[in-house]
Each structure stands twice: as structure tokens, then as C-alpha cells.
Image (cartoon, grey):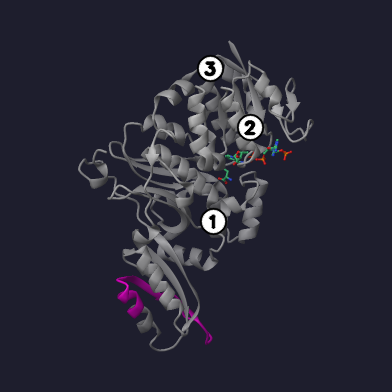
Amino acid sequence: MQTVPIALLGCGTVGSGVVRMLTEDAEFLAQRTGLRFDVRYVLALQANPKARVALTGAKWVTSMDPILADKDVGIVVELIGGTTFALECSKAALSAGKALVTANKAMLARHGGELFPLAHSTDSCIGFEAAVAGGVPVILGLRDGLVANRIRAIYAILNGTANYILTEMTGANKPYEQALAEAQAAGYAEADPTYDVDGIDAAHKIAILAGLAFGEDIAFDRIRIEGIRGLQLDEIVNARQLGYVIKMLAVAERMSDRRLSLRVHPCLVAKDNPLASVDGPFNAISMFGHAVGHVLMYGRGAGQSPTASAVVSDLVDVAIGHARRRFQSLKIWPGKTRPAQIVSTDNLVSRFYLRLQVADQPGVMAQVTRILGSHQISLSSVLQKEVPLTGPVNVVITTHRAREGDLRAAVDEIDRLPVTKAATAWLRVIDLPAEGIDAGDEWNRKE
Ligand code: NDP
Ligand code: HSE
């Protein structure tokens, strides 16, 4: 039996979940792995913070110094969050040659370019299974299971809080604010929940996945990010009537010119697509590889114990020596890969949903269809809901495939018409890629 001393930075929702798992499941883990984890230090804001967990034997510290000085501690688990103090501590741990285990996707997406090369230079490693999709082992899946695949695309639900909100608004007609408050109370949300609802957290995660999947360095600022904050109930109701569900998807896709499209946005997903049935705090990741075809991973993407499950998996991986060896041999980490070329969403082609609010008078539809036609946008369906009184009417349109830049230009023009009474709401309608396991597709050719 090997005892593994570790230091824990931050003991909030996830940190206390890790402590609970390491104490309550100590015997079970020891039997399976031959390891016993000894939480020797907990770094927290105060020397005696609100004890969320019963932890005996650990020293509560307020600085990294004693942790760095303790040569027996080879693994530092960062569960503070954010990109300031957590980054400082992570760099200090790696510089001292200690392995870093972290759930901090914001830090990795924005500072991976510094942290990964640092870990290499000190013969250390970084475990980050918990940073993407909570308890779903998607990092392991991409990094190991799919290593032989050229990945064409990833379509994923990566934020449990936003998905919980959409599920509750759709299924239970709950107001947005109530659903968000419930997600926060359940421990799903970030310390600043705007990261969840504005799509930033999902963008952090897709940046990490895309880097691994495509073997390219991702500049986080090039990701197009649209959240769910401005989404109206009308869109949810109309989508349902049309046979769709609204989901906030994170997408990373190799285009035919080899550039990448990276984006997070709410969109209409057909009800028979597996992603449409992913509800509440669950995440799902659809990945398309040239050899394997379509792989779908599903599970709890947020919350204390699913995330602790991923952290403990990394701890075992580091302690038995796999993580360090893999980290030093594979060439899929930031700093080992070339910079990605990223396309603007204006050049993407997809179907669209539009809701216009226009005056109910003759000739209005003619003006709208003329504008759409002049931008090469062809209509697939039009629905005008009958209203009892005079006043603006909602006209719901779906289009055939069109260029996003053309759609934006058309919407701008429609919104300037005197008959338009409010800004047009529009969303993308998503078609997942064909499986494409045949060799010969343009994205499938060798580098
Ligand atoms: P919490 O806010 O619950 O916990 C953060 C902890 O860090 C708290 O104990 C806090 O102390 C402590 N802390 C904050 N600032 C400092 C500081 N300057 N010095 C020392 N300690 C500090 O966050 P979570 O546990 O939810 O999240 C932790 C990380 O895990 C984040 O990176 C998050 O994105 C990630 N994550 C979270 C998931 C979830 O479902 N919650 C899922 C996957 C990843 P205090 O208690 O005193 O405020
Ligand atoms: N706030 C995140 C979410 C936690 O809701 O998905 C998991 O990373």
C-alpha cells in the first residue's frame, strides 16, 4: 500500500467533495488502486475556514510556502477557480516540479500556453479531467481512446447550469431567474454565474477539447460566444411547435479548407437528435472521428460528486505514474502544437430560425421575402400566428441553408423597415455532420 501526500487548494463545492470521497471511500480506493491519499495541506482563505467537511490531520494554510517546501507532497490539487491567485499557485506548484490536478477550465483555456510548457520544462504534468464535462471522462476519451482519430467535429452540451435553465424553462415553464437560482443552490454554477449563462464557461471547455482533438493551439479570444441570457420564451415555444428543442451548444469543427470553426451559441436541435434529450445538469459530447465515426459521451457535467469523481481519477492517474509518462510523450498539449487558423462565423452555412415582429398589414411579407431573396436566403417554412387585436404580429420563418453573413445582413435590413416593430430574433438550426467514416472526405486527408 502506498500513501500519497497531497495538497488541496480551495475547499468549496468541489474541494469538499474530493475530501469526502478520499475519506469516505478510502478503503474502496485502496483496494482498487493500492493507494491511500493523505490530504496533508488545505490552502483556504482563512486558517480555519467554514469546515464543510470533516478533515482531520490536514494543516490549514493560507500560503503556498509550506506546500512548496514539503518535498513529500508531489501533487497539488487546485480547486479555487479563476485566473489570478489560482494561476499563481499553479505556476508555483509546477515550477517546484509538483504535478497539478485542476478543474479550472478558465485558467487552462486562457493560460494553457504558459502552464503546459512549464509542466514540460519541470518534468511534471497536469491532470484536468474535471475541467470539462464534470464527471464525464471526455479528456481521457479524446486523449487516449480516440488518439488514432483525425477529429472532424465536436458538438457538445458543456454547461450544466445553462442546460438546467433551458430544461426548466422548456419543461416546467419556469422563469429564467428561478431556474438560475436553483442551479446555483445545487452547486452547478460558477462563482460568477454570468460565465454560465453567457456561454463563457462552455467556450473555455470547447477551447480545451478543440486543442486536444485537433492538435492545435486555440486562441480563446477567437471563439464566437453567444449565451442564453437574451433568449425569449417565444423561441422555446416556437421551436417546440416546429419539432425542435433549444440547446446551448459548443461546437468545434474542421472546415474543408482545414481551418477551424469554434463557437458557443443557443440553437435549434431536432427532437430526434440525442443532444435534444440531454436535460438538467447533464452534459453530452458528440465527437466525429475519421476512423471511429460518431462517439457520444453523456453524464453529469456539474455538481460536487461528479466533479470530485473526475478529480480523484486524475489523482490515481498521477500517483501510479501514467499521467507524467503520457504527458511527456504525447504531443497534443498547448506549446507542442501549431496555432489554429479560425474562421469567422460569417462564412458558416446553416439553416436559420427567425421571429419577426411586424405590422399586420398588406405587403409586409412581400418586403421581407424580397430582402431575404436578395441575400440568397430561401424560405423553408413561414408561420404567422393569428392575433385578436390590431398590433404587431409574430412571423416565424425557417430558412434553407444560407451563409451566416448573408443572414445577418438580411436581418439588419429587415429591422430597418418601417413595418418592423421590434428587433428580429434569430437562431441557428443545427444539422450534425454525417458520420463520415469513409476515407476520402476533404477533411479526412492527411496533414
Ligand atoms: P467554490 O467557490 O465553491 O470553491 C472555491 C474555494 O476556493 C472556496 O473554498 C474558497 O474559499 C476558496 N478560495 C477562493 N479564493 C481563494 C483564495 N484567494 N485563497 C484561498 N482559497 C480561496 O467553487 P467550486 O468548488 O464550485 O469550483 C472550484 C473550481 O472547480 C472552479 O475552477 C470551477 O470552475 C471548477 N468546477 C466546478 C464545478 C462545479 O460543479 N461546481 C464542476 C467542474 C469544475 P471560501 O469558501 O472561503 O470562499
Ligand atoms: N458551472 C459549470 C457548469 C460547472 O454549470 O457546467 C461545471 O464545469
Name the kind of residue labelled 3 in the image: Thr
**Could you tell me which quadrant the N terminus lies in?**
top right
Is 430 situated above or below 120?
below
353 left or right, relative to 17: left
- Which residue is most to the left? 440
N-terminal of the pair, mark 1 or mark 3, is: 3
N-terminal of the pair, mark 1 or mark 2, is: 2
Q: Where residue 166 is drawn, which disc sits there?
A: 1
Q: Residues within 10 Å of mark 1 (few under 14, many from 20)?
A: many
Name the kind of residue labelled 2 in the image: Cys
Q: Nearer the viewer, residue 111 or 48?
A: 111
Say if mark 1 contacts mark 2, CB within 8 Å. Answer: no
Q: Nearer the viewer, residue 342 or 429?
A: 342
Label 2 – label 3 distance at C-alpha: 28 Å
Q: Which residue is mark 2?
A: 89
- Judged from the image, the secondary structure of the residue bearing numbered disc 1 is helix
Image point (39%, 58%), residue name:
345
- Which residue is most to the top? 1
